[in-house]
Amino acid sequence: MMGAQTSAFKPRLLAPFALSGPATLFFIGLVLLPLLLTIILSFNSYDYTAGIQGDFTFANYLTVLRDEYYLSTFWRTLRLALLTTVITVLIGVPEAYVLSNMRKPWRSIFLLVIIGPLLVSVVVRTFGWSMLLGKNGFVNGALAIVDLDPVQLLYTETAIVIGLVHIMLPFMVIPVWTVLQKLDPTVEAAALTLGASRFTALRRIVFPQAALGILSGSLIVFALSASSFAIPGLLGGRRLKMAATLVYDEFLIELNWPLGATIAIIVLVANLVIMLAYNRLIERQAKRKLG
């Protein structure tokens, strides 16, 4: 009798492993294994006449961390990604709040307007911005109408930030809107009834509860901005490099795969450290305010 019960429990114990097994294998094969191979590749040396050497060396990391060119590119990448995140928070959070207070059918219409650009290729949208910001584009055309001198926007950091904000804004609005949908609207109404101003109600009630949505959105925006390739490549040109364009140049132009892998690993580690520290800070503040 005990043996029959034991055999009956075995399928139940094995079911979670059997169900999660395919996804685990895909994760190992598509994420962990390539990452491991990239780490191993970053410790190989490279010779322009003989190609990749199989010896173990830290020379690639020392080269990247000591070179002012690479360090300035890393700083530009993190700075523009942080600036993009801040701007998307300033624009996306009020937009999500307004969206959450809309009634049907306007809510569905504006939600479609926000999500709609995601259906268009990033390259196509970035080309659109290059035409708008170009020397003979719409912006300089509008300045010429009012007798103002043309400005150089394309191939500048400003153009990169504009493109990143436009591309990344839905990734900020959707998480915040999802969190706001779960909030009880009567709590904010009660605060207003008790004499709190609209700003106080937003600061003391709505914002702390939406902090986790802001955290999720900002982490997504920062990670995607720091690893973006098409937008810096098309709007920044060959002069303004970011981390992803550096990796592209080393892999496909210089053919120095170990150095490209080193740059990719350094950027990955820097992003993880920043994102984990930011995650810990926001969660601590949200827990303190929400109890």
Image: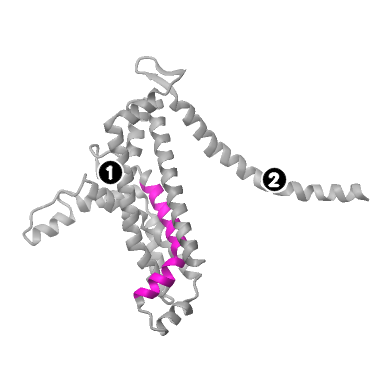
Q: Is residue 196 left or right of residue 156?
A: right
Q: Is residue 125 visible?
A: no
- Picture quadrant of residue 26: top right
Comparing labels 2 and 1, the label whose residue is closer to the camera: 2
Question: Crowding at label 2, few (<14), some or many (≥20) Cα neighbours within 10 Å?
Answer: few
The quadrant where residue 146 appears: bottom left
Q: Is residue 273 above or below residue 288?
A: above
The residue most toward the top is 50
Residue drawn 39% across the image and 75% down it: 201
Q: Is residue 104 above or below residue 246?
A: below
**Magenta stretch holds residue 223:** yes
- Residue occupying image coordinates x 21% and y 46%: 156
Residue 256 lies, with reference to residue 2, above or below; the image says above
- Residue 24 placement (x, y as % from top left): 61, 42
Residue found 17% across the figure and 53% down from its top = 137
> Residue most toward the left?
147
Magenta-span inclusion, residue 170 = no
Give the residue at mark 1. Answer: 234
Residue 144's spot in the image, x, y percent?
9, 57
Residue 89, given in percent of the width and then of the height, sits at 35, 60
Which element carries disc 2, helix, strand or loop?
helix
Which residue is labeled 2 in the image? 17
Q: In the rendering, at what x and y percent does residue 233 appear?
A: 29, 41
Which residues are the magenta region?
199-225
**Amino acid marked by disc 1:** Leu
Q: Relative to the observer, which residue lies in front, 2 or 127?
A: 2
